Structure formats: structure tokens, C-alpha cells
Image: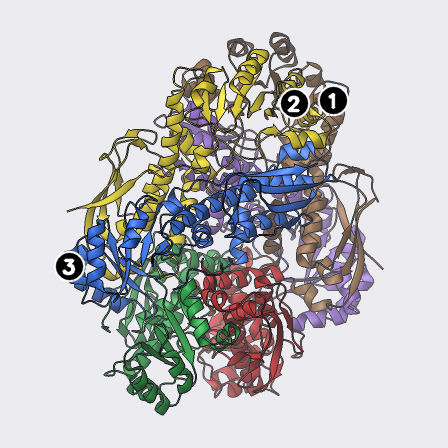
Chain colours: A brown, B purple, C red, D green, E blue, F yellow
């Protein structure tokens, strides 16, 4: 598994749909009443989007679409790519065209960019923290409703990997499933029987005893939840590379390297998407 | 202006639409393949949602709808209201009904609840920090795309006030509008002429000189951006209660009380909605 | 407040959405079966849209989009702007391109144009009737379901002002709200406490006694409903410019000037949008 | 052809979709900020909808859905049916339930009811004017964008008949189609060849000469456009019952009876739907 | 009624909407993860779509839109038209442009093309089988949910005619309607009274006795359901050209010619749309 | 892998959305004009849906929703489950309630039921044909646009397994991907690097040489395309259970058992979904 992977772009029809929702939310039925009252249609302007704190950028494609949907006459040029690092003062995009459209689209474009760049930046901090280990950082389903595709993309932009996208594309068996199914063996067998051959199965365990019970079953991965470092190390030893190992539960920048050094394959971090800090970005007109 | 205001509920059709989007995002075309493979339709369960850190709750109405849309047989009972304080261990909702629907809806419900409760909690921290002053905390348009109505609601749940909802419901004239219009007087007059009588007008100023120029114009509020405490105090003195005063720019829990004590009416805080920390919540089955 | 204001254009994404609904309504699943059976794709034509009675035009942007969505090869040229006056026989738009697309789009384009021009024309008649007074004509929420943004735009095109766009962007307290709140003071205070600082508050009164009760409260405007001219004059005197005054109730072209001369600031007229007469327009092919 | 026909109700999924659009338009993202600030959720009320001028009612089903979508606890009772006559002061619906939902839904419900009742009332005036003749009144495609299904329904409620619903359900060949097809015979034959056997074909003629040319062709109806009474009479004579005859063009209440007495089968009136006068209706709370 | 009719194209807004649904279904939130991981954005390719079995093509317009929505840089060229015959090995479309977009759009484009071409091919086999008779082949409402417009179009591409598009555009009275109405005369009269003058009425009969009862009533067509050849011949004789005759019920390629030779005008075949065999098509890259 | 698996139901919000589309398609703007003209709202009826040829049923849940959306007063009772076998004459559902709603919903309900039951029946024939072998039947992405979730469900109802649902939930590398990536090793490694740990990777090979190249690479499954029985047997031998084997290409009921006996794990059959024969079903009123 290489860490140096190109970033997969988002389907355009997905981006346009999300940007339309955001524009409709901001424009309402009356539109940008300030700009229209104060800025003539014929005023042209140049502007730039720059970062005010160091970080990884994500969402340039979305920002571009926001301005294009408002006015195709706005040109949006960027010399960087999503996932790139930018330091304070760096310009990440150059805009030129009708001033009114730039002003009207500013907030929608920046809201996407700063939110997604915040996720990419936070992800990258975790990726950096485990550099040199064999582990990878991945996300969870703890995403902002309506934005999962974009937040998972931002995680990739930050160098992280994606866990399953939803309830539909992989099986993840937790304690309540096991209880309802009447034991882990019954749960795994039923899942294996129901799922097609292109579906992976992961099972969550909290203890080494549960792990032992799992080891003889046909699963693809195990989620080692809320284990101590010692338990994680022991779990990795017992699993011995036979299935993918994922650690989760209260992972922070302080603890992540220790977890990685236990030898787990993946460390999933909910806070990448449920509690990112927006990257500070600004749009400035050039006079 | 009283601070003790009841919380205005969200229109149900708005809530249902947002929950549907979130459920579709999580269910995809195949649905919850784990639960369906392991949990029989006839298994009933009781579960509770509880908080794991102190905070203000927001989103109970949304969580209720999430389970109802999956299966009307799930009952959702709560003894608290949005805006209420909960301490670690408190149960904020009781669920009973088909186990499958509870498991399938868990993540969507918690994603809304933890995100919105995080905003309410952060808002309330700012509100608390300025207690005893005459200032109010308010939000901005720096919201997560698609969730503005819900995030603005969470700000109210935390005791904050809402700034304008979008570009359409109030005029906010910034430096680029002034430049394009040919001066602040021209900008304000044009805005006044375009806007209906139910639309308020606010103007952003960075300096006391700009403020002086504004004072003779028919505006409802002034946004004092990135001013020092001294400048804010002086601005409040010059304005002398004639229009509403709003301070903004890099407001933190460390600085907010000082700002409030300058006598401004409102302090707007972008990070309430662009960088909240999700409140830690969990759903547990009762055995 | 100047009466000579430029017309604020509608957000394009709003226009496209409305035109699509109208086209889908007219085309159904089978499309224009008459045109397709009788007009070859390669037939080109020139046509013009002209007015058959004097009026103010509104909706040119929408008509343009209707033809463009059917076939980008249709060119739509106009030498006038929404809000302009046209006399019978005037051509307001020139079309050229595939005859089939022009025939198919004709009715949708004309339905928007004639409806919105009817509103602009009726609005302008009221505006004209009060020329020289200080009053302005404004609209209400008595609009056609689904078309509020467009009808409010047409009111502006006719020289009128917009009242609030919906229940969400301003507070208007009526008798039933006052009764439920336990008096006008309680109602106003509660509204002031709930509404953000960018929200205006208007209260409806039917009598001078109610007005007196209101005068000490923090409201932005008063709606003087169904008052006689004498009452209106007296109300204006008592208010003395402290808040905006709006007269409403059974306003007609016969009575509007008298009402304006009482000194009220605004006269709201429901019939502008609930009972306009479509402007007679036609599309003719040029041979 | 009997004139006494029961009224065909609208598909519920159509009504719900239209009401949702109207509610979303009126509620925006913040909802009814006035009612929520002033009316507690627990206040119950009784109210009635009554008419203030004589007319035919249409839209009761839609009004009912508006309140139900806001709050299923609102009961909506009516003793009349769409199409019934009501005189000033008549109550057409009784409401009871949460006061807040009644206040919030009032305008959407009344906007539908007054607009559609206006169409039904106007239609009925034309129907009444030709009583005793063999002619029927019918509508056109000159409808308000987005509301065609509802306006055509209101025409039926007023005793009128529906012309085609769109470009898709019947063929109507006009002069430009004839010109493009190379003559009326070519146009009719091509239409006959393209259209399925369940599609009717009507041709518009302006002169008796054009009518003569048409009489040998396989058409179902002829639209006699802008003819004088004398021409209409002559046309009816020449057609001699072989095909359905429709008169159109500048029909008013003054001229419609004369037109009907020429013996035409149908008289189509664009103003039924493009220029109705809203019926004056009000919602009053009962104390 | 001529059989040689040009094919009426589908409204573009209809095609785009359907293609978007299909692309969203295939791309989900993550997009084409295979292509994006393996094919660089800058790789260009040429490809062709060819047929692997003889048939009539339908859906070229839709395939073109599928690739355009993914990437406007893909060119789609075809030398044939929908409805044309293609033999195995024939290329029906040439593609060139970004390889990634061609790979991603391949399945959606082929799914439409092979399904609709299968319908056109099957339709044409029936049309061919009755060549030389006066009968026409037509479709039914037994279509795939969501695809009716496209499947009816494919029937036309195969040389067939369209029956009504839905419950809304023509009246078809069956036995249960007759029973509920209290007899065929009551049913027809009620339908005639309710339906506008542009709506045709057809009645289904199973026996010659029912046919006799119908003959004096004002109907446009009769559906002779599940009759023997002898009964059909007798029915045609009794009807004697006064109304359109349609035979239906278990029509196969073996029986259709015999049915046509009874003299009926139309033969409706449900299996054209409910059980077509997809035409075998492939997309090949040219090296 | 057990073959006896319970059937996973479809998410209700998915079913309702699809049924609404189908009802809107059939009802248009005017609704069921036949039924409404002939069947009074107060007529009640009992009806049954029965099969006219042997088969496996799929779609009962969808049919139930179709009637419920039209009128909640219709009761829909069934004693069987999707996936069950029914012989000619068997009643699969009992309906009672308003006759009008039953008549209006009949075609939409039957269109879903007969299409999906056709797929389940065809799938089951293939499953039956390989009984006793270790192979499973699975579907492809050759589905009807817009119906993939339902068709994949019907495959499961027939005892088949689902291949990936779209381009997003699994990687399937074909020859063009390999060519663009510069060889199979590069393609697999790039896919492995891009895909998350819950994503499976399958590679298509046409020859044993390609298979050999693949065997050392980290893939989960191999698609053996268009191989002879001898090649398949040899491929299975070389793979020796290390990865999942799937055979595809021109599979028919005649050839499927032979293919299964080569020892492959899965046999994918495109015609299950691209060319099913609708199961003959009827709805009859009980008198």
C-alpha cells in the first residue's frame, strides 16, 4: 500500500448539485441585495484567494464551480492542486471578471474551501505524526450530513484513506449486531451469506478474548476499539498479518504515533470530519 | 432585548428534507447491509442516547425524525429540550422499538445531534463569558453548506442571536461595495433606495474615520471590524446608542469579555459555526 | 428614499429552475407533437415579440432562458430593459434560429412575460397615481404559489417596493398574534427578543387607540389597516416620522392618491400580485 | 355532452408537491418568526375561512393539505365542495387545532383558494352567460407557470371544460406550422402519421377559405380564430356537425353569448386563467 | 395513415434528467474509483460503439448526452439515426476525447442504447411481420417505471405507434369501469361529459355482444381484447370503419399477421416494452 | 457461503421515491381521467393479484406502497414473501378498499411486480440449473437506468448474489484500464493505493497468460471473461482457491451448468437484468 497517491477528483454532477444547494441557501428568492444595489454589472475586478494560516488545500474544484454557476464570465485560475501545502500569504486562486459575481460567490466558495481545507489539514497532521510507521490514517462515517462525499475527498486530499462511505458498501459488525445475531460466528456467517463477493467484512472487538473468537472466521478486517497500547500490540501479534487491523477510539495527535507503533494497519479518527477547524482563508480584491 | 427567549422550532418540512438527504447518503441503494444480515425484523430493543461531556443539546427534533422516517414503530422520548444543559452520563433520549431501525438510524441521528450540540455548546460558552454585560453573541454566514438553517438554530439553542440568514434578508455593505459604489454615502443611498422598508442596512467600518463618515447616513447598524478595544470603546462613545453596534474579527473566549465591556451591542463569532467541536454523544442498547 | 432605482436582476439559477418547471409542464413526456410533426429541424425563422396594449415590461430575462433551454441556437435580442414602457405595436424582442424551438417555447415565454408585465403595468399605474407625494407603493405576500420571487421582481420593475418576502425575513405582528401573546407590549417584546438585530418589526393596528399603545414600543413600522383617510392623517400626525407608516386595505386606483396625501410612507396593494391583468403580447413570425 | 358533471379531484401527490413548494417559499430557512415568537405551541384556536364576495369555490383540498403538512393536529372541516357557490359571509371551512399552525398556514392556503376560486368564479360567469345554448366554455394553455394542473382544475370547478393540457396530449396546428409544413394538407397528414390513434387533431383557421380547404381533411376539430359573428355562423353551417367547432379570440362577457348563439361547440377564453381576479376570502379566529 | 414517418426527437431537458439519474446511480458518492486510479486525466482515446447482432438502433441522443455530461471534451459522432437498421459489426457511433470519461460513461450509455434498441428491434419485427396489411403495431402502458417516455420513443423508432402515454391523456374504459358506472352507456356518457373535446375515448370489449352494445355510443376506438381471429373479423365487419379498431391480448410474432389480416387498425403488444431483449452492443477502444 | 439467505428488504425512502416517479409518470397533471369519470369515490371493491405463469415473486413491498400512496384506505395483504415460488392461479396479494384507487394504481403496481418477478424468476432458473455445484449466480451493472437498486434486489429474491452496485463500491479493472495504466501490475498497485481498505479489487482476464501475470498481485477476485470450459477449469486449478473466481460472457441456461462444474465460484449473467421476461400477472376484481 503506497502512501503517495494522486487525488481522485469528484464527479462534476455531484459538485454542481452541492454548489447549487449552497448558492440557493445564500441567495434565497431575492438574491444578493447588497451587491446588486451597490455594484454595477459592468464593473470588472481582479481578486485573489489566499491563506492566512499554514495548511493543506481542498475544494478548489468546488470554488471554481461556485463562481462559474453565478457567471461564466468569471475566470478562476489556480497554480496548485488539492492536497498541496500552502503557507500564510500564499495565493491559492486568482479570479477576474464581473465584480458583482465575485462578491456574491465569495462566501459560498470560501465556506467550502475553508471547511474542506480544514479537514485536509487536520488529516495531514495525523498522517505526519505517524510518518515512518506502516499505519495509515482513515476517516469514519461521523461526517456532516449532506457533505460526506466532499469530506471523504478532503480526507484523501490530506493523505488519509477512506473507510466505507456508508452502510451500503461494506459490512461492519458491532456488538449489537453480534448480540442480535446470537454470537459472532452466527453474525459473520450471516453477513458472508448475504453480502456479495465484492463486499468486505469487518468486525469490531473490544477485548482480546473477542479477537480470539474472531480469528477463525472469514473476515477481512478487525476493528480494535478502545484498546490500550499493550492490548493493541498483543492483538497485532495474534492476528499476525492474516487480516487488516484497524484501531479506533479517542485517537488524538498525542496518542496516534504510539498507536501506529503497535503495528496496526489503520487508525480511524472520527474528529477529522466531525470536529475540523476551518482553515482561515480570505478573498481580497486587487486594486 | 431579553436574553431569556424560548427556542423557535424548525419547520418540519425543512427537517424532513434534510434528514432524507442524510439517510440517502448513508443508505445508498443497498441499505444497511450489516444490520439486515444480522438483525431480524422482529427483534425489539431499548436504547438511550447519552452525553459523554458537558454541553448544550440541539437537534432532538431532527433525531426524532431520523428514526421515524426509518420506521414509525420506533418511539423516541425525551425529557429535555433543545438548549438544555446536560452533564456527562445524562440520558437525553430514550428509544424503543425494532432494533434494526435503531441501529440503522443511529449514525445519522448522532451526526446531527453531535454537530448541532457542539455549536450550541460553543455558543453558550461565549454567552456565558459575557454574562452581565449588555452584549449579545451572534453568528455569521460562515456555515457548513446545506446546513445553515440548522446551524443558525443551534446558535439560538446556545443562547446566541442570528445575524442575517443569507445575502437576501438584510444589507451588509463592505469595503468592496463601497469602492464599487463610489463612496459610503453613495453605497448607503443606493441600498436604501433598492431595499424595501422591512430590510435593515449595516455597514462595515475598519477605522474611526470611516465611522464618522457613516454617522450621518441612514443605516441601522455598524459592523466594527478588527478594531482594538480602545477603538471599540471610542466607537461606541461616538455612536452613542443611535445605531446598533457589532464587533467582529478574531473573537475568542479570551477576548470576548473585553470586547463586550466596550459597550458594543453584538459580537459576531464565525467560529461558532465554521469550527465547532462535535459534542461527544453515544447511543447504547439497554440489555 | 429615491424612487429612481435600477432594477435588480434575478439570480440565474432561480430563473432556470422556474423555466424548467414551466417547460416540463408544457412538454410532458411526449414533447411538442404538433411542431415536431410539421416543422423540420432545419427550418430557420425570424420572429418578434410585440405588445398589443401599453404597459411596462417584465420578464425578458426569463423569456430568453426559455428559448435557450430548448435550443441554444435560438438568438434572443432585445433593445429594452425590464421596467421600460412599451406602446402597442412595439417590438420588445427579436428571435432568430430554428423555427421548431421558437414555436415550442412561445407559450412558456409569453406566459411568463405577459403575467409579469401585467404586474409591472398595474404597479406602475399605482405609482403614477401618487406621483408627487412622498408615498411608495409596495406589494404583499398575496402572490401566486411558486412565483413569489418573480412577482416581487415584477413589482420592482413597475416602480414599486417589496414588502417582506415571506414569514422568515421580517416580523409582522397582527391581531391574532397580539391576542395569543397577551397584549401588544408582550408581543413586541417577545418578537424583539427572538429576532436577530437585522430583522425589522412591524405591527398592524386598526384603530388610533391601538396606535397610541404602540408608540412607546420598539417597532420599526406600523401597518395602518383599513383606516379612513381622516384616521390615516391623524395617525401620521401622532407618529410624527418616528416609525415607518404603511397603509393597507382595499386600496384602488381611485383611492390611492387620497391615501398617499395623508402622508403615509407606504401603501401596500395586494391586488398587484393576486389580481393582475396579463399584458397582451404576441409572438409573430416574420416572413 | 352533459354540463352537469362531477368534479374530478386532483392526484394527492400533485397537491402535496405544490403545497410544499408554496410553504417552502413562505417559510424560508427561518420559518414563521412572528408566530413562533408570539404564539405558544400549546395555544389552541378555532378559526373559519369565509368569503367576502359571491363566487365559486375551488381549492379546498389544497388548503386542507397546507394545514396538514404544517401540523396534522389541525382539523379542517368543510360542508361544501369545490365548484359550489358561496355568498358573502358564508363560511367555507372550519379549522381547529394549534393556533400557531393555523396562523402560519393561513396565507399559503388563502393564496391557493383565492386564486383558484377566482378562476372558478370567472369561468362560471362565462358558463352562465351562455346558458341555454349548446356551447361550452373551455380554457387555454395561457396559464400561470407551475400551476397549470390546478388552474385547469379550477376551470372545471367553474363548469368549464379543459382544452389540451400541454403540447404533448393533442395536436393543434396553427398558421406557422402550416407554413413550415408547406400547406394545411401536408401538415394534417404529417400530424396524422406521427400522432398515435388516441391523439386528436385540431387546426386553426382565420378565414372561411382556409376552412373550406380543411373540410376534406381528417381532423377532429377546428379552431375558428378571431372571426366575426357572421363568419362564425357561416363556418358552423359549412361544417355541419362533422367536426367539433371552437371559437377563440378576444372573447368577453359582452360577446360570449353572441358567439355561443352562432352554434359553435366550444368557446375558449384565455383570460379565465391568465387574468382572473382573486376571490376575496378571509381567515378569522373565533374568540 | 402513412407508415413512413420521421422520428420525433425527445425534449432535451427530459433526456438530461434521465441521464443524470443514471449517472448518479452508477457513480454514487465516490465516483468511478477504478478509472480514476488507473487512467490519467490526460490520456486521450478513440473508441467506437458497434452492434453485435442485427437490429434497429434507438437512444443515440441519450448516449451522446451521457458522455457530454461527464466531460464536454468527449466528441460523439454518428452517421446513422435512431430507427436505422444496423447489422453485426456496424459502428453506430465514434467517440474521441479523454479516455477516463469514455470509460466512466460506457455502461450508462450502453444500458440506454441496448435497452431502447432492443425495444426498437422487437417493434420492427412485429411491424415487418404485418407488412402489406393495413394494420399498425402499437405499445401499451406496460413500461418500465421511470422510462416510459424513452420506451415509447423506442417503439416509434422501430416503426410502431404510441398508445396513450398515461392515465391522463386519453380515456380507456375497461370492464371494471363499466361495472362501477352501471353499464357501458353510463360509463361512456360520463366519460364524454368529463373529458375535454381533445380527449379520445376507447372502450374494451371481450365479446361481440358487448361490441354491439357499444356501436351506438360516441366512442373513438374499441379495444377488442383476447378475441379469436373469427371474432376479430366479425367485429371489424360490424364496426365497418366507423371507429378505430385495436386488437390486443397475447399477440406474438406467430399470430400477429393473422390478426392484422382480420382488418383491425391497430395491434397493441405489451411485450414490446415489458419484455424486450437488449440489443447486444459493445464499446471498443481503437488502438 | 450459504445459499439459503433471508432477503434484505429495500429502504422505504428508496421505494417511496421510485413509486412516486412511476405514479407521476402515469398520472400526469390530469390524473386517471377514466376512473374518476366512471367510478364514484364511495365504491368499495375487493381484488386480487394472481400469477398466470410459474415464477418467483419480487416487488410486493413496492406494490403495497403504490396503493398506499394513492389512498391509505386501500389494504394490501399478502401471505407470501418476495422470493417465494408461485404457480399459475396463485393469488399473491389481496386488496380491498376504494375501487378507484385500486384501478388507478393497478398498472404501476403490476409494472414493478411483473418486471422484478421476471428477474427473480430468470435468476432462479440459473440458480436451479447449477444446483449441487459450489458456484453462485450473480448479476452485473447491465441494469435498467434508474432501477438498479430494485433489479439487484430482484436478483437476490431469485437466489442470486449481487456484484458491485456501481462504479463506486468496488474496483473492477478491465483491459482498457490495464492499457492506460501501463500493465496489470501498475494498475493493481495504483488501485490498491487509491482504494480504502474496505474496497475489493477484481481484475478481468481473457487468457491464461494474463491470469498467470495476475496471480502474484494483491487482488481479491478475478473475472475470467469469455473463456472456454477447458480454460476455465485450468484457471480454477491454477488459482487454487487463493482468490474468488468469476466466469462471465455469453452465459445461457444451456451452458451455465458446465461452467459451474469447472469449479468457478461465481457466474455473472448480464441477461438477468438486461433482458428479463416480465412475469405474467393480473389484477382481478372479485364480484
Horizontal and vertical percent position of residue C244: 58, 74
Q: Which residue is nearer to you in this view: D137 or E230?
A: E230
Tell me if B229 is positioned left or right of C217 in this view: right
Q: Which mark is residue A267?
A: 2
Q: Which residue is nearer to you in this view: F212 or A121?
A: F212
Determine if residue F269 is in view.
Answer: yes
- Chain holding disc 1: A
Horizontal and vertical percent position of residue C274: 45, 73
Q: Nearer the viewer, mark 1 or mark 3?
A: 3
Q: Which residue is nearer to you in this view: C185 or A108?
A: A108
Callout 1 and callout 2 share a chain: yes
Residue of label 3: E182
Q: Which mark is residue A130?
A: 1
Residue F31 figure quarter: bottom left
Tell me if F279 is positioned left or right of C73 in this view: left
Circles 1 and 2, Cβ within 8 Å, touching? The answer is yes
Residue A152 versus residue C36 in the image, above or below: above
Q: Nearer the viewer, mark 2 or mark 3?
A: 3
How many residues crowd mark 1 within 10 Å: few (<14), some (14–19), many (20+)? Answer: many
Q: Quadrant of the N terminus of chain E?
A: bottom left
Mark 1 or 2, nearer chain start: 1
Horizontal and vertical percent position of residue F193: 69, 26
Amino acid at each position: 500500500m503506497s502512501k503517495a497517491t494522486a487525488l481522485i477528483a469528484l464527479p462534476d454532477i455531484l459538485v454542481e448539485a452541492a454548489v447549487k444547494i449552497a448558492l440557493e441557501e445564500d441567495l434565497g428568492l431575492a438574491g444578493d441585495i447588497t451587491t446588486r444595489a451597490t455594484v454595477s454589472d459592468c464593473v470588472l475586478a481582479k481578486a485573489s484567494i489566499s491563506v492566512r494560516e499554514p495548511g493543506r488545500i481542498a475544494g478548489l474544484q468546488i470554488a471554481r464551480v461556485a463562481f462559474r454557476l453565478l457567471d461564466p464570465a468569471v475566470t478562476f485560475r489556480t497554480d496548485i492542486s488539492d492536497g498541496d501545502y500552502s503557507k500564510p500569504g500564499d495565493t491559492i486562486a486568482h479570479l477576474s471578471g464581473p465584480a458583482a459575481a465575485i462578491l456574491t460567490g465569495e462566501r459560498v466558495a470560501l465556506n467550502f474551501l475553508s471547511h474542506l481545507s480544514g479537514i485536509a489539514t487536520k488529516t495531514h497532521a495525523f498522517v505526519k505524526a505517524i510518518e515512518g510507521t506502516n499505519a495509515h490514517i482513515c476517516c469514519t462515517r461521523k461526517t456532516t450530513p449532506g457533505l460526506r462525499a466532499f469530506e471523504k475527498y478532503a480526507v484523501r486530499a490530506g493523505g488519509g484513506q477512506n473507510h466505507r462511505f456508508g452502510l451500503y458498501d461494506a459490512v461492519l459488525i458491532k456488538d449489537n449486531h453480534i448480540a442480535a445475531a446470537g454470537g459472532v460466528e452466527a453474525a459473520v456467517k450471516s453477513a458472508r451469506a448475504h453480502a456479495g463477493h465484492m463486499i468486505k467484512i469487518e468486525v469490531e472487538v473490544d477485548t482480546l478474548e473477542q479477537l480470539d473468537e474472531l480469528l477463525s472466521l472469514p473476515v477481512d478486517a478487525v476493528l480494535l476499539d478502545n484498546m490500550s497500547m499493550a492490548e493493541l500490540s498483543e492483538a497485532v501479534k495474534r492476528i499476525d498479518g492474516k487480516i487488516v487491523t484497524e484501531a479506533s477510539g479517542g485517537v488524538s495527535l498525542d496518542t496516534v504515533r504510539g498507536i501506529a507503533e503497535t503495528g496496526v494497519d489503520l487508525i480511524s479518527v472520527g474528529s477529522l470530519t466531525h470536529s475540523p477547524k476551518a482553515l482561515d482563508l480570505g478573498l481580497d480584491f486587487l486594486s
